[in-house]
Amino acid sequence: MKTYKKYAGLVLLAIALLLNLAACKKDAKQEVFNPDEAAITAAIASATTLYATTTEGSKPGTYAIGAKAALQTAINLATATKTSTQYSQREVDNATANLTRAVTAYQARLIQDVSVANLIAQWTFAGNANDISGHNHNGVLMTGYTGATDGNTLPSAIADRFNRPNNAYDFQNGANIEVPYTTDLNPKEFTISLWVKRHETNPNNYMFSLNDYNGFKFQLQGGNFLFLTIHANDGYHDVDSNPGVVPQDVWTFISVSYTNGTMKFYVNDKLVKTAAVTGTPITLPTPVNLIIGNNLPKSMKGSNYFKGSLDDIRFYNRALSDAEVLSIFTIENTL
């Protein structure tokens, strides 16, 4: 009798467990087949409208080439989730969040006019080294040191990345361009952008400098990383763009920005590194000319001269946003 009661109790317990499991499965089934689709429906509709009413191009108001493909992929994935009967509420919510992020990323690729209000100087090298910003920071073609001796070579006018003759400069044997010093060339924050075609690996490929490391210098290092040195009120800061590298003998867009707290490096249309750096660049106690392609003063003579070609240099007295840097790249990447 005791044995019978024991087994009867076990049977009842098993039945209870099965009923509980069935209830759980029912709840899970309901979660899969009855998600709230209001948010994902609205997100898909908004993203689809954005896709249909915008265009790609290289002018302000258009979106960078390739941006629409990524947005369409995100819309397709969200639509597949919405129309399926096999997704839970959590998965539908995740798909909605992913589409929202894709829309944000797409909007960041809008090409915009970059305000000229903060443009200190712009050298297009279209037959000369004049500044077209209106601030008259015109450059002078100079010979320069290649060690202890002068290389006796001026920058040579060459074809640019669009094969237009006399629209870029090649720098060899210490050749450089000097820009007379004024205080606005010594800003407290800045962005430098330019196109570069390096001819060889050189640990001291100086491209753009104000009093060497006593002010700031933008160069290529031995690993072909971008490298920025700033003399700030709290000391010296040296940062490279690793892992972002510059290829050899290929026209490449590069940029660096600095503001108190942040330094950013860009290669073509990619932000390749962000570094936390504090301090404000010092004001030079003794004026030294800004130099492109080498370093000054000449007492710093050495092998720091640039070996390669440069074009379309911009200098801003503000740290531009990622979208603004992308806009410069996109606008300058096409005729």
Image (cartoon, rainbow, N blue to C red):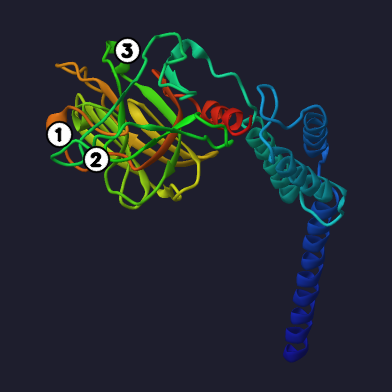
Going by the numbered disc 3, the residue's amino acid type is: Asp
Q: Give the image location of residue 54, x and y in percent.
A: 77, 28
Q: Residue at x 73, y 32 (%)?
A: 56
Mark 3 residue element? helix
Q: Which residue is mark 1?
A: 300
Identify which residue, 177 or 290, lies in the foreground: 177
If the image is split into quadrants, where does the N terminus sit?
bottom right
Mark 2 residue element? loop
Q: Residue at x 56, y 28 (%)?
A: 323
98 horizontally vs 20: left or right: left
Q: Are marks 1 and 2 in contact (CB under 8 Å)?
A: yes
Q: Point out the frontmost of discs 2 and 3.
A: 2
**Label of residue 282 in the image:** none
Q: Give the image location of residue 35, x and y in percent.
A: 81, 46
User: Crowding near pointer 2: few (<14 within 10 Å), some, many (20+)?
Assistant: many
Residue 68's image quarter? top right
- Regarding residue 187, the answer to whether it shows in the image is no
Q: Give the image location of residue 318, x and y in percent.
A: 41, 19
Picture layout, residue 65 above or below residue 201 = above
**Furthest residue to the front?**
152
Distance CA(mark 1)–CA(mark 2): 9 Å
Q: Which residue is mark 2?
A: 304
Distance CA(mark 1)–CA(mark 3): 23 Å
Q: Are marks 2 and 3 in contact (CB under 8 Å)?
A: no
Q: Which residue is mark 3?
A: 184
